Image: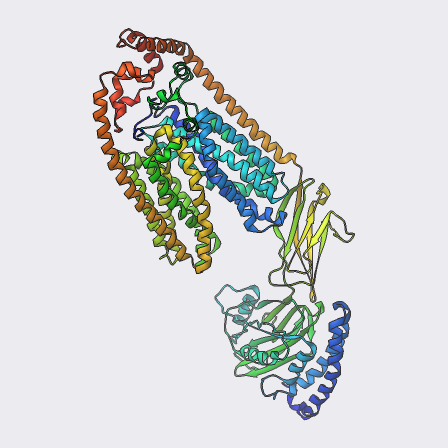
Amino acid sequence: MRALQGLRGLGAVLPLLLLCFLAALRRSLEHGLSTAAPFKSLPVQEEMMTKYSNLSLESHNISVTAAPFTSLPVQEEMMTKSSNLSLESHSISMTAAPFTSLPVQEEMMTKSSNLSLESHSISMTAMPIKENNKGNQICVDRGIMLQRNVTLEHSNMPVEKNITLERPSNVELICQFTPSGDLNSVNVTWKKGDKLLEDNYLVNATGGTLYTQHRVAVINSKQMGSYSCFFGEKKQQRGTFNLKVPEINGQNKPLITYLGDSVVLMCKCQDCLPLNWTWYGGNGSVQVPIGVPVNDKYVISGKHANETRLKITQLSEDDQGTYLCHAIFELGESEGHVKLVVLSYLVPLKVFCAIAAEVVLLVAAILLFEMYTQKKKKPSDDGKEFEQGEQLKLDDSNGIENSGPRHRKNESVGQ
Amino acid sequence: MPPPGGTPPPHPPPDGGWGWVVVGAAFISIGFSYAFPKAVTVFFKEIQLLFNTTYSEIAWISSTMLAVMYAGGPISSVLVNKYGSRPVVMVGGLLCCLGMVSASYSTNVVELYFTMGLICGLGLAFNLQPALTIIGKYFYKKRPVANGLAMAGSPVFLSTLAPFNQYLFNTYGWKGSFMILGGLLLNCCVAGSLMRPVEPKASTESKNKVGVRETDCSMKKRQKKLSVWEEINKYLDFSLFKHRGFLIYLSGNVIMFLGFFAPVIFLAPYAKDKGIDEYSAAFLLSVMAFVDMFARPTVGLIANSKLIRPRIQYFFSFAVMFTGICHLLCALAEDYTSLVVYAVFFGLGFGSVSSVLFETLMDLVGAQRFSSAVGLVTVVECCPVLLGPPLAGKLVDETGQYKYMYLACGAIVVLASVWLLIGNAANYRLLAREKKKSIHTKESQETEPLKTSQSPSVNIKSGKNEEWKGAEVNSSERETNI
């Protein structure tokens, strides 16, 4: 925006030059993307992109008066069309409220602002925007997205934002800062990690808010990392965007298996589709890739899906340990852990034998106890049998003769 | 017409003493039978991953186990009729152990169906029916309390087995856990060894000497010319299908079970659907199980009271109606608190129904025919128990809401309760009429008791015969142990 005035003169000529250049670029780019393997063609593209981004810095400031149906600078549209990349815009807004429990950065900021005479209210909003890979439609969509982007939101969000990127895309990072003092005295800088960034960002001041925007064309893993916008010299007044690849979910609890068994280890990625999966077996610190010499022991399935399975047969003690599943994205790698424990069959067998022994003991004790109590009854039982036999013979009588023995029997049973 | 079920068996049940130990043994057996199929679901996720199948294929293991447990009822009844409860329960324990240990060596789902589903299910069937039967043999006066206490085994075991299974899984994996669970199921043998037969061996031998059956006096005549029908009935009493009370019970229960278990199974998904988080939804089930645990013995005590016992069939119908109304009101539940209230009342209803479920059957058919009755009831109930949840699930899928499923289940259960109420009211009236008739005829036969009676036990108690005739419970002379 600052260089806008100076380069306005070139406005008419440059877009035409760009168009010619891009026409040539487009054909080669398309060709490059469709035929070559991802890791081969990228350097070539990057080179061109860097060149192009050098161009774009200059032209960007000019073409604020963009094509009619969108409020975008023209080159953004072209950049997207030619590179088949999507635009992502992120902006962070942070507020420092003195009496809330804030993350460390905000806390320090609060302290510092309390110390200073000026009271700063910094607002940075974070609004993720969904990427859109469809050809021409991007323009219109992006137009809407950008407009949404500019909306100020004062919220107590943390000053750090994690952004998950799966495919190469253009990312727009926006920080908004509302100082209570003089706007122009605030020096806005962008850093990637510790390296200061010299180009590719805008600073705008409207109302009482400083608005800075940084565009990153994320092609490969080199552009991933931590981007921070700094307002002024104080290290605490900043917002950080962490560009990361999606995380992989392995299995949190260790898998218990036995010798000679087979097991299936699974790694899953929520809502993402890696280019490739590889498995590594870790015994100690040495990571050995699995399945490279293809053998029966390891069977990997689902290499090009959002989950991968590794089946290991004929488990032995050496197979114990942590297995890593690497998901390869265009923008880097991510890994998940699965821990495998191999036990011997004797371990549960011992428990089983212990329980079985307890059961046998109890059953024997109960049955012996029963036999013992029945033996006590036995002499009287023999008598009882005799009595019953006699009673049946003496059916006709009223049982008076048996009253004596019956009495006795009743007494003994009553015990 | 067979004797009214309210009469106690010829050999007076001890109603105490060793009976309480038997209740403990039945507690263990019933607990394992009902809780085990539900508690093994903890292992299914890993097994599904290893055998590379869908979740529904794995869930069938649990259904198969339950199905075989119910369908194995008649086999179990036949064996109990012939050999008594003790050997059957011990064989059941051994079968369960064998099933689980061989399941730990299985390599595909079909083998699991066979080992866990069939063998283990059969073993559990051999545990359930004899446990219920022996309570009837040991108790008469305090039978509802004994039933309530024994049935309380189900929720207690479920709440202990579920977390215990999780622990086993974390420590030993699914294979080791199956082996250890097999060992645990051997404890059913311990329970079986405690189930001492009621009559002492001596009297059985003497009875055999004179060749007299335990049951009706009139059966002695028929024994001399045993037709095929009688042979079969000796093992499994199919004549029960002519028993009016039994038929009412059976039909009512079939209708009830269609809508009985689905609300339990769908409670957690229903809560999650309303936006409640996973742990709170699981807590609902724990609340239900907790209330159930205490409801069963309490309701058993209530059912034993002087007021309720003679009208226990009405009590059962009202308990079923209460449960049905709970389901109907659940459809109105909107937030978490109302769901918790529902869970509490449902636990109460579920517990009271389960507590008197088998007590009412014993009351209708009598302890002698109970073993056959329970076998026949479970094999017929097998269908609605298995069909209920999938049908309810289909209803949820069709309508997209759980509300209608609860309304449907509530309506079915209320319908069953109304049917039971009407049927039992009619049954009671007819029974009273028959009793009056039989008293008249017996009074005329009283003059020649000693000559015609065959059973020595009747001979011994000739002076006390009248007390055994009546269906009244409050005779104190029953305390004597003979």
Q: Name the residue at 71% across, 86% down.
A: A19
Q: Is residue A286 left or right of residue A341?
A: right
| Residue B386 in the image, given as x and y percentages of width and height | 46, 45
Quadrant of the frame with the N terminus of chain B? top left
Q: How many marks?
A: 0
Q: Name the residue at 32% across, 47% down.
A: B321
Question: Is residue A52 shown above or below B396?
Answer: below
Q: Name the residue at 59% across, 82% down.
A: A204
The one nearer the camera, B87 or A309, is: B87
Q: Is residue B262 left or right of residue A121?
A: left
| Residue B90 in the image, given as x and y percentages of width and height | 50, 28
| Residue B437 in the image, given as x and y percentages of width and height | 22, 29
Q: Quadrant of residue A35?
A: bottom right
Question: Is residue B460 shown above or below A143?
Answer: above
The one nearer the camera, A101 or A277, is: A277
* Res. B470 visible in picture: yes
Q: Quadrant of residue B27?
A: top left
Question: Is residue A171 shown above or below B383?
Answer: below
Quadrant of the frame with the C terminus of chain B? top left
Q: Quadrant of residue B73?
A: top left
Q: What colour scheme does the image use? A: rainbow
* Res. B162 visible in picture: no
Q: Name the residue at 56% across, 46% down.
A: B44
Q: Is residue B412 left or right of residue A228?
A: left
| Residue A302 in the image, given as x and y percentages of width and height | 67, 57
The one nearer the camera, B292 or B223, is: B223
